[in-house]
Image: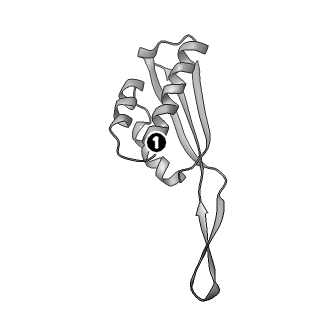
């Protein structure tokens, strides 16, 4: 049995989110939440809320025991990129790419 939670179109670059996601992969749920609470990265609160949501899904929808849950799979994939333009010298313009992420987590029981 597994419980999932997915957040889409998060306004953070997937490369930055992957750094946070790699830290908690394979950890017990309570340990992962404690690590994310103290991680000084911008993606940490987003991943914290996502794991918290997955735990709630596991308890309420699948009747799983919180003490046995661990982060079986967690990923941060690239979403659509918003393109904006910034004026530059001599009448030129450069593209600003505002990247988004799709972050998902799968919890399983040991």
With 37 as the anchor, is 56 left or right in this view?
right
With 24 as the anchor, is 75 left or right in this view?
right
Where residue 106 sits: x, y (%)? 55, 29
Residue matched to label 1:
21
Q: Judge by depth and name the residue closer to the eye, 86 or 27.
A: 86
Element at label 1: helix
Residue 9 sits in which quadrant?
top right
Residue 99 sits in which quadrant?
bottom right
Quarter of the image with the C terminus is: top left
| Residue at horizontal 39 percent and vertical 47 percent from the top | 41
| Residue at horizontal 50 percent and vertical 22 percent from the top | 55
> In the rendered image of this protein, does residue 61 appear above or below residue 101?
above
| Residue at horizontal 67 percent and vertical 53 percent from the top | 80
Q: Judge by depth and name the residue closer to the eye, 46 or 24.
A: 46
Where residue 71 sits: x, y (%)? 47, 29
> In the rendered image of this protein, does residue 48 appear above or below residue 14?
above
């Amino acid at each position: 049995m597994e419980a999932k939670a997915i957040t889409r179109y998060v306004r953070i670059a997937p490369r930055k989110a992957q750094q946070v996601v790699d830290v908690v992969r394979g950890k017990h749920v309570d340990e992962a939440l404690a690590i994310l609470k103290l991680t000084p990265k911008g993606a940490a609160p987003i991943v914290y809320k996502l794991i918290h949501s997955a735990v709630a899904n596991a308890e309420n929808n699948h009747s799983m025991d919180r003490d046995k849950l661990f982060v079986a799979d967690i990923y941060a994939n690239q979403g659509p990129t918003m393109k904006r333009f910034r004026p530059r010298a001599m009448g030129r313009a450069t593209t600003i790419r505002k990247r988004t992420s799709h972050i998902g987590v799968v919890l399983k029981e040991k």
